[in-house]
Image (cartoon, rainbow, N blue to C red):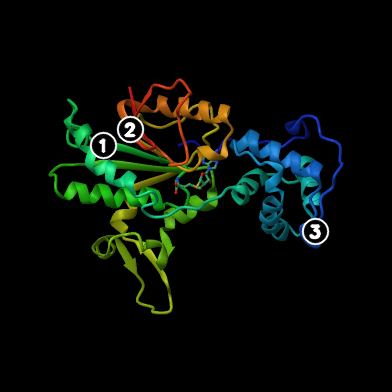
């Protein structure tokens, strides 16, 4: 997988600046971000990561920038922008994207999808002439995998499925734009309550607890960690340097993009999905009306025609 496309920040990125009117009230002492600078940041984030940041998100952006201001010893969002857009913060773009992205995720998030995977998708793929999973490994991609709960849920579900079927093999790739989320995904350490949705017998099989009773964290067992390969991939890239997949999960990310970006991302995703392969999107997301080669199978589940 390629590293994150180099993101260059320049004053030209944001086009014409709006007049600096309606300066909003500062979010907190010393963290002021003017409307003009908010718009520059919003344009930059949209161009590089696809994420839309309407004005309603201004205080969220100010709150999240706080971490970067502290790390860099800067007093305000405006000072940060002056440096960022003036070329004085080499390599800052990926840190900025890291703090702006929303990494919320869960094990067995939208659990119906994992039931459908086992009950409909895998049996159908196994019945195809190559017997996908037996004739060759099943290839699954968790795009925008955040800190790893989604690909590790897939690993547990597929491993359990394989126990009943001799010779069933699979490969899982998890990608995200966010470096910090990928580091956490590779570590596979989670607060213990995060695995509440994992069935108790699966927790025994797939999850490790520390012997230290004061440590409330858990870790995916080594053999589960080995089932997932992680890499950085920005869905805004022109093409995705991955194999053609049998199943793709791209959930709870399209909602952050505008319609045209969603369409372009979905075209590239379809390019990486084999005919007869399956695409899962988030339950609040749709691919309808984009003229894509997908037919609806169930809620938020599509099949490449
Ligand atoms: C809300 S999380 C969803 C995680 C998981 N798919 C789920 O449903 O639980 C959205 C993820 O998309 C990632 N993301 C945002 N923009 C992206 C982009 N342009 N390319 C790849 N990943 C992106 C974020 O870093 C974040 O981890």
Report x, y in % for residue 166.
12, 44
For the residue labelled by badge 3, is the local secondary structure a helix, a strand or a loop? loop
Say whether marks 2 and 1 touch (CB < 8 Å). Answer: yes
* Left or right of residue 267, residue 304 in this image: left
* Marks 2 and 1, the one that precedes in the sequence: 1
Asked if 28 appears above or below 287 in the picture, the reply is below
Location of the N terminus by quadrant is top left
Q: CA distance from mark 2 to mark 3?
A: 48 Å
Camera-nearest label, 3 or 1: 1
Report x, y in % for residue 217.
42, 69
Query: Which of 283/175 is in front?
Result: 283
* Marks 3 and 1, the one that precedes in the sequence: 3
* Structural crowding at the residue carrying mark 1, measured as other residues with C-alpha within 10 Å and reported as few (<14), some (14–19) or many (≥20): many
- Label 1 sits on residue: 121
Query: Which of 128/7 is in front?
Result: 128
Say whether marks 3 and 1 touch (CB < 8 Å). Answer: no
* Left or right of residue 247, residue 215 in this image: right
Circle number at residue 19? none
Query: Which of 121/101 is in front?
Result: 121
- Label 2 sits on residue: 278
* Structural crowding at the residue carrying mark 3, measured as other residues with C-alpha within 10 Å and reported as few (<14), some (14–19) or many (≥20): some
- Label 3 sits on residue: 75
At horizontal 80% and vertical 58% (from top left) the residue drawn is 75
Location of the C terminus by quadrant is top left
């Amino acid at each position: 997988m390629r590293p994150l496309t180099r993101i260059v920040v320049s004053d030209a990125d944001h086009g014409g600046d709006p007049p600096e009117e309606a300066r909003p009230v500062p979010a907190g002492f010393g963290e002021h971000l003017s409307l003009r600078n908010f718009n520059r940041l919003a344009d930059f984030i949209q161009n590089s990561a696809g994420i839309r940041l309407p004005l309603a998100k201004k205080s969220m952006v100010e709150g999240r920038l706080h971490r970067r201001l502290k790390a860099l010893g800067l007093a305000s969002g405006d000072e940060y922008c002056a440096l960022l857009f003036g070329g004085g913060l080499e390599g800052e773009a990926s840190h900025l994207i890291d703090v702006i992205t929303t990494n919320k995720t869960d094990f067995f998030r939208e659990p119906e999808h994992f039931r459908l995977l086992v009950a409909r998708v895998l049996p159908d793929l196994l019945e195809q002439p190559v017997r996908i999973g037996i004739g060759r490994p099943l290839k699954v991609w968790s795009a925008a995998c955040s800190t790893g709960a989604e690909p590790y849920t897939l690993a547990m579900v597929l491993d359990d499925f394989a126990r009943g079927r001799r010779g069933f093999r699979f490969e899982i790739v998890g990608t995200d734009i966010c470096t910090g989320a990928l580091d956490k995904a590779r570590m596979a350490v989670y607060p213990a309550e995060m695995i509440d949705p994992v069935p108790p017998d699966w927790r025994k099989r797939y999850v490790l607890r520390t012997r230290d009773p004061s440590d409330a964290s858990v870790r995916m067992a080594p053999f589960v960690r080995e089932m997932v390969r992680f890499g950085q991939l920005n869905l805004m890239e022109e093409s995705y340097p991955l194999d053609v997949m049998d199943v793709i999960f791209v959930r709870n990310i399209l909602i952050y993009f505008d319609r045209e970006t969603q369409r372009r991302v979905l075209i590239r995703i379809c390019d990486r999905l084999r005919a007869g392969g399956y695409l899962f999107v988030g339950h609040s997301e749709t691919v309808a009306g984009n003229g894509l080669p997908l037919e609806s199978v169930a809620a938020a589940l599509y099949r490449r025609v």
